[in-house]
Image (cartoon, rainbow, N blue to C red):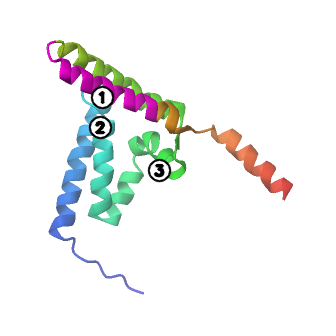
């Protein structure tokens, strides 16, 4: 059976472009301490999901996606390393912002609320994913019990 390839629509191309720009900014954020990674990678995922299956598949195969978001999207859980990868740069960035906005108390309150929400959500709401070895052993034990 021969596959027919549809030409991507303009909106799909624009979603892909926005996704690549966001992914690039997220990649830079993984290297540069003042640029956040997480919001840009989340935005990239949102854009790529609306662009095309091929681009979305490519995105889900990247190291950055696998490190930070794959376990969350599949299991609604994250490894400790992934949580720290999100929270440490976020805390540093928000801490710097908080210090620089000493004369703007309203923004300091906003930053404190955002930081607290991230700590509560990723620290207490998102489950901690068990290591792969423990998961494999529990699967084997369940199979033997049946």
**Residue 129 left/right relative to 145:** left
Front residue (pair 87, 22): 87
Asked if the magenta segment contains residue 104, the reply would be yes
The vertical placement of 105 against 124, above or below, is: above
Mark 3 or 1, nearer chain start: 1
Inspect the magenta stretch and tell me whether residue 113 lies in it.
Answer: yes
- As helix, strand or loop, the secondary structure at mark 3 comes to helix
Above-or-below relation of 80 to 47: above
Question: What is the span of residues highlighted in magenta in the rendered image?
Answer: 103-121
Q: Nearer the viewer, mark 3 or mark 2?
A: 3
Q: Main secondary structure of the magenta part?
A: helix
Give the residue at mark 3: 73
Q: Are dots 1 and 2 in contact, CB under 8 Å? A: yes
Residue sitting at the far bottom: 1
Labels in figure, total: 3
Q: Which mark is residue 16?
A: none
Residue tagged 1: 31
**Label 3 close to label 2 by CB (< 8 Å):** no
Query: Which residue bears the numbered disc 2?
Result: 27
Please, is residue 121 above or below residue 48 in the view? above
Residue 69 point in image, percent of width and height: 44, 44
Q: Is residue 126 visible?
A: yes
């Amino acid at each position: 059976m021969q596959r027919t390839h549809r030409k991507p629509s303009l909106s799909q191309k624009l979603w892909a472009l926005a996704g690549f720009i966001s992914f690039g900014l997220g990649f830079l954020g993984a290297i540069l301490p003042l640029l956040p990674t997480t919001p840009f990678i989340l935005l990239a995922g949102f854009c790529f999901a609306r662009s095309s299956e091929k681009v979305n598949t490519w995105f889900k195969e990247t190291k950055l996606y696998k490190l930070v978001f794959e376990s969350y999207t599949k299991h609604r859980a994250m490894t400790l390393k992934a949580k720290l990868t999100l929270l440490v740069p976020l805390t540093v960035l928000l801490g710097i912002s908080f210090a620089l906005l000493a004369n703007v108390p309203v923004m300091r309150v906003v930053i404190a609320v955002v930081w607290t929400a991230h700590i509560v959500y990723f620290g207490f709401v998102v489950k901690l994913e068990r290591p792969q070895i423990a998961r494999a052993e529990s699967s084997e034990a369940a199979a033997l019990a049946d």
